[in-house]
Image (cartoon, rainbow, N blue to C red):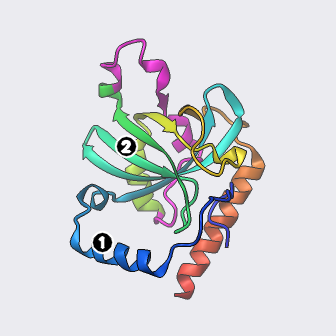
Amino acid sequence: MASSCHEVEVPGKPTETGTALLETATGTIQGFAPLGQIHQHLCAFHFYADDMGRQVEAHHFCAHLNEDVRQCLIFDGPGAGACLIGVEYFVSEPVFLTLPDEEKPLWHSHEFEVKGGVLFMPGVPGAVERRDLEKVCRTYGKTVHFWQVDRGDPLPLGLPQIMMALTREGQLRQDLADCTHRIAVLILVSHLMI
C-alpha cells in the first residue's frame, strides 16, 4: 500500500535484525518527551513559494507549546514508511501581528485551507474536528521543507524551501487531491480490518 502520493526510493540496505533489536532496546530505555507531546494529525497541501505548480501532500503531526504556538513535524504521508520532509510553526493572529513586517511574508494564513476543506484532521469525527479547526482557522504558519519528494529526490537535497498554503479555489492540483483521498480510504480500511 502506498504511504504517500510522492513515492521516493531511499538509498540504503534494509534495516538489519541487530539494528532493529538495538532500536527496541534504546526505545524502551530512553525518553521521547518532545515526541510524546504530539497529539494531533492534520493533513493539508503545500506549494513551493517560488513555484505554485509544485505541490505536495503534507501530513502534520503537531504539539502545542501553548495556546498561541504549535509546532509540527511534516511527513509526506500518514503511514509508517513516510518521510520526514519539513516543519511548520503555527501562531495565533495576535502573535503573528507582533512579527516584524519583513518576517510576515514568510507566513501564510490557514483561513482558506480550513474553510475550503483542504486542511483537515484525518479520521477525526466532524464535531471534534470542527472545534479544533475553528482555532486553526485563525492561525498563521511558517513552513520549511527540507526534502523535495515531489521531484523524487532520494534524500533531502539542496536548500530548504519556504512553502505556502492554498488561498483560493482552483489552486489545488486535482490529481494530488485524488491521490490523498485514495490513500486515506486505504488506511481507514486497513485500520478497520485490525
Q: Which residue is mark 2?
A: 135
Tell me the magenta residue range: 96-125
Can residue 84 be found in the magenta stretch?
A: no
Image-quadrant location for residue 101? top left
**Mark found first going from the N terminus, 2 or 1:** 1
Q: Amino acid at mark 1?
A: Gly
- Note whether 100 is above or below 130 in the view shown: above
Residue 138 drawn at (x, y percent)? 40, 35
Label 2–label 1 contact, CB within 8 A: no
Element type where label 1 sits in the image: helix
In this orientation, which residue lies closer to the viewer: 152 or 12?
Answer: 12
Question: How crowded is the residue under tag 1: few (<14 C-alpha within 10 Å), some, or many (20+)?
Answer: few
In this orientation, which residue lies closer to the viewer: 194 or 10?
Answer: 10
- Note whether 44 is above or below 15 in the view shown: above
What residue do we see at 55% from left, 61% from top? 82
Can residue 109 be found in the magenta stretch?
A: yes
Residue 162 drawn at (x, y percent)? 53, 30
161 sits to left or right of 55: left
Q: Main secondary structure of the magenta part?
A: loop
What residue do we see at 49% from left, 29% from top? 108
Image-quadrant location for residue 147? top right
In this orientation, which residue lies closer to the viewer: 176 or 30?
Answer: 30
Disc 2 to disc 1, how far (Cα)? Answer: 34 Å
Q: Amino acid at mark 2?
A: Lys
Residue 144 drawn at (x, y percent)? 49, 36
Element type where label 2 sits in the image: helix
What residue do we see at 38% from left, 80% from top? 21
- Is residue 62 in sight in this rendering? yes
Q: Name the mark on residue 27.
A: 1
Question: How crowded is the residue under tag 2: few (<14 C-alpha within 10 Å), some, or many (20+)?
Answer: some
